[in-house]
Image (cartoon, rainbow, N blue to C red):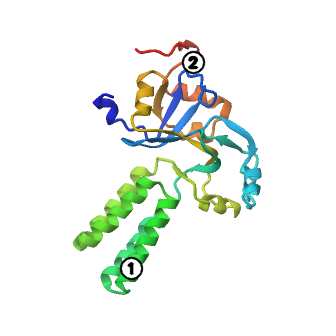
């Protein structure tokens, strides 16, 4: 693999299958890449609905869906891995201040000596665990790092607040994927994020695998558009994703080869 391939980051991008990719699931598929690093990639197919409506899935996990607007929304086939497990792709929750505010309270308490250091450490650990389940791993890591840095450098408290808000805003345009029931439980109470896509299974690539497939012209890539995921009928998502590149599907060769 070339050095260029080694540093590629397709997080928050669409993978669009080339016409010659005739895998049963990935044929004419659009995959939203949730995470991509040198270790590999993880994504969800967003245009292959199953015959299971969301209300039925909720019934199977002993929850009642209190969101009439989504009762008939299909559960999607997210990929060939762990197809019995649910994955939720949704707009960020609580990015406007919940995480930053909670972190700030814990740090202030520890610095002022208002609580026992052991209890404060436990609170930090619980908050970090909560963030790792509720938010993306990337964001949770950023806030966790900020927590650790603020403890080591107490004079930088004000700067920490600014940095945390910047990190939150920088990730606000990216969707989050979770396997926690938090989002589903919120929806069962009529709350939760307004934009949600639920899949059974996910797609994954090992180290260098996705880069190699792209080099072999199996996939096209483009920055993701939330409107295609949430506002476009599933049967039109492949064509609309192609349109983001200014491409006409009929003009593409069905032959996969090297440029």
Depth check, front residue: 88 or 92: 88
State left or right for residue 84 relative to residue 108. Answer: right
Q: Position of residue 72 (x, y in %)?
A: 76, 46
Visible residue check, residue 56: yes
Which residue is denoted by mark 2 in the rendering?
Answer: 249
Of the 4 image quadrants, the one containing the N terminus is: top left
Q: At 42% from the left edge and 15% from the top edge, which residue is drawn?
A: 258
Q: Earlier in the sequence, mark 2 or mark 1?
A: 1
Give the class, few, some or many, for how many residues have Cα within 10 Å of label 2's Cα (few <14, many ≥20).
some
Determine whether the residue tagged by mark 1 lies in a helix, strand or loop: helix
Q: Toward which corner of the image does residue 167 lie, by quadrant?
A: bottom left
Which residue is denoted by mark 1 in the rendering?
Answer: 120
Residue 209 vertical placement versus 173 (above, below)? above
> In the drawing, what numbered circle is on residue 231?
none
Distance (Cα) linking label 2 and label 1: 57 Å
Q: Toward which corner of the image does residue 48 lie, by quadrant?
A: top right
Residue 133 vertical placement versus 84 (above, below)? below
Visible residue check, residue 165: no
Q: Position of residue 8 (x, y in %)?
A: 36, 35
Give the class, few, some or many, for how many residues have Cα within 10 Å of label 1's Cα (few <14, many ≥20).
some
State left or right for residue 52 relative to residue 255. Answer: right
Q: At 65% from the left edge and 58% from the top edge, which residue is drawn?
A: 184
Q: At 38% from the left edge and 58% from the top edge, which residue is drawn?
A: 141
């Amino acid at each position: 693999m070339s050095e260029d391939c080694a540093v590629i980051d397709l997080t928050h991008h669409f993978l669009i299958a080339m016409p010659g990719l005739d895998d049963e699931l990935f044929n004419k598929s659009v995959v939203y890449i949730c995470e991509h690093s040198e270790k590999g990639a993880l994504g969800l197919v967003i245009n292959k609905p199953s015959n299971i409506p969301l209300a039925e899935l909720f019934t199977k996990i002993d929850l009642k869906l209190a969101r009439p607007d989504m009762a008939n929304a299909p559960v999607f086939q997210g990929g060939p891995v762990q197809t019995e497990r649910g994955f939720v792709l949704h707009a960020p929750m609580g990015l406007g201040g919940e995480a930053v505010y909670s972190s700030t309270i814990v740090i202030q308490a520890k610095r002022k000596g208002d609580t026992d250091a052991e209890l404060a450490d436990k609170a930090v650990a619980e908050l970090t665990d909560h963030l790792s389940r509720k938010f993306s791993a990337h964001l949770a890591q950023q806030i966790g790092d900020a927590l650790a840095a603020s403890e080591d450098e107490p004079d930088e408290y004000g700067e920490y607040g600014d940095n945390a808000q910047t990190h939150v805003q920088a990730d606000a345009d990216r969707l989050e994927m979770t396997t926690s029931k938090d989002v589903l439980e919120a929806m069962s109470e009529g709350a939760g994020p307004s934009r949600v896509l639920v899949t059974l299974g996910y797609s994954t690539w090992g180290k260098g695998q996705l880069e190699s497939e792209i080099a072999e012209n199996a996939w096209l890539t483009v920055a993701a558009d939330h409107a295609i995921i949430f506002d476009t009928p599933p049967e039109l998502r492949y064509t609309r994703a192609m349109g983001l590149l200014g491409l006409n599907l009929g003009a593409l060769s069905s032959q996969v080869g090297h440029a």
